[in-house]
Image (spheres, rainbow, N blue to C red):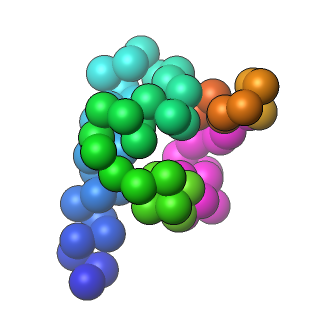
Amino acid sequence: MAYIIHLLENIILKKLIESDGTIFQSTFVEELDFSKVKVTRLLDKLEGKGVLERKRRGMTNVVILKH
């Protein structure tokens, strides 16, 4: 199970890097076909590890890769 989570985190990070380090959280749901809950949990984990941060923008969040 941990291996699968690790793979999903890498998918999120790859998409974020491809988007020049900034992307709307809703874009992950739309383009990766992940549920909102799955995206939120993955981003929570990555944010907790200090890899990225989220900022509220209207009805969604902007996800920003930390350098």
Q: Is residue 46 something that shows in the picture? A: no
Task: Give the camera-side residue of 20 and 27.
Answer: 27
23 sits left or right of 59 in the view: left
- Report which quarter residue 19 is drawn in: top left
* Position of the C terminus by quadrant: top right
Q: Residue at x 53, y 46 (%)?
A: 51
Q: Residue at x 23, y 60 (%)?
A: 7
Image position, residue 13 (x, y; %): 36, 41
Q: Is residue 34 something that shows in the picture? A: yes
Task: Give the camera-side residue of 31 and 46.
Answer: 31
54 sits left or right of 7 in the view: right
Image position, residue 17 (x, y; %): 36, 26
The relative height of residue 58 versus residue 5 in the rendered view (above or below) is: above
- Report which quarter residue 24 is drawn in: top right
* Position of the N terminus by quadrant: bottom left
Q: Which residues are magenta?
A: 43-55
Image position, residue 15 (x, y; %): 32, 32
Q: Residue at x 44, y 61 (%)?
A: 38
